[in-house]
Amino acid sequence: MLRRVCTIAANSYRESVRARVLHGLFALAAGTAGYALVVGAYALQDTLRVVSDLGAASVSLYGLLVAVVIGATSLYREIELKTVFPILARPIRRWEYILGKFLGTWLTLAVFIVANTGILLGAIAALSGKNPWLVVALWIVTTGLTAIVVAFAHRFRTFAVLPWALAVFIVGWCMAGSAPDDRQVLTASAALTLCEVAIISSITTVFSSFSSPFLTALLTFGVLIVGRSADTLMHLPARLFGGPLVKIASALGAVVPNLMIYLPPRSLLTGELSGITVTGYVARSASHALGWCVMLLALASAIFHRRDFQ
């Protein structure tokens, strides 16, 4: 069972990494990191804080966009091209196929988020006094080593991006040691973004199991907006909005995942709030995301199992 799931995940990862939209969004995210540097340079004070906050927000935004785009098109593309038929004709359960597609998508998102966070950490290191050319040189070395691996192992060229993204992150994390608070903000935000995009990927998997890419993206964005407003919806004043509307809003806030969990205040991420540790908060958020992913993937598997492809 595990081998079948890993095979589907690997194939899904290869398809996602080769997608042009992923490359475009990665370039846009890197450009946003440069924009954050420009804005930080014009800040009168707290330049590092401006860059880390804008960077964390951009990683979250682009991570969600990639999750929606890839999640909405991955399964539908295989159904349209009829490549799913020979796969399901083999001794593989449909829930294993759904789980493999989800894991492949999430792995792609992890590479995207980790690499972008590493770039932002390198920018923080340069602003905090480290030699920027040293950071660039280390990135060039990691990219060169990755290129060598790709040159001699064509079969694994898509998977070479995994160690490259991890190396970019490690270089940025080590070099940003002179700005511990901002490094912690970016690192914790990246971990929370990984949890949030896992939920969004599960939601797109549910919708894509029975609908088109456009409808899947539309429904997912709707759930995303409601999830980002869950706290507000559950605390609407009845005096202003009326009892029936408040009940509907509270029901919506209770049914959808509360995504505001993954957007905590900066004071929590820097460890300034007493009684709450960053590690504990991230662990609880990961447990929350895992629970939602299990339920949503079970629902997607049930829907996909009943789907007739004839």
Image (cartoon, rainbow, N blue to C red):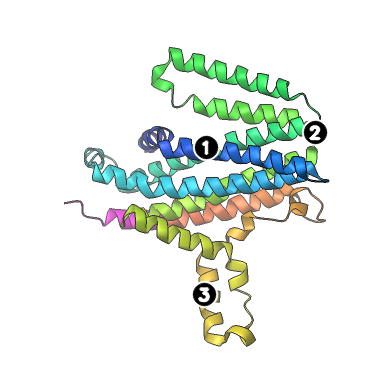
User: Label for residue 251?
Assistant: 3
Q: Nearer the viewer, mark 3 or mark 2?
A: 2
Q: Position of residue 212 (x, y in %)?
A: 31, 55
* Amino acid found under the numbered disc labelled 2: Ser
The mark tally for this picture is: 3
237 to 193, vertically: above or below: below
Looking at the image, is mark 3 or mark 2 earlier in the sequence?
Answer: 2
Which portion, as a residue range, is magenta?
298-310
Label 2: state its secondary structure. Answer: loop
Q: Is residue 297 left or right of residue 49?
A: left
Between 266 and 104, which is closer to the camera in this rendering? Answer: 266
User: Label for residue 128?
Assistant: 2
Q: Residue at x 52, y 49 (%)?
A: 64
Does 304 appear in magenta? yes
Does 69 appear in magenta? no
* Amino acid found under the numbered disc labelled 3: Ala
Is the residue marked by circle 2 packed among few (<14), some (14-19), or many (20+) residues within 10 Å?
some
Q: Which residue is mark 1?
A: 26
Whole-angstrom CA distance, mark 1 to mark 2, is 25 Å
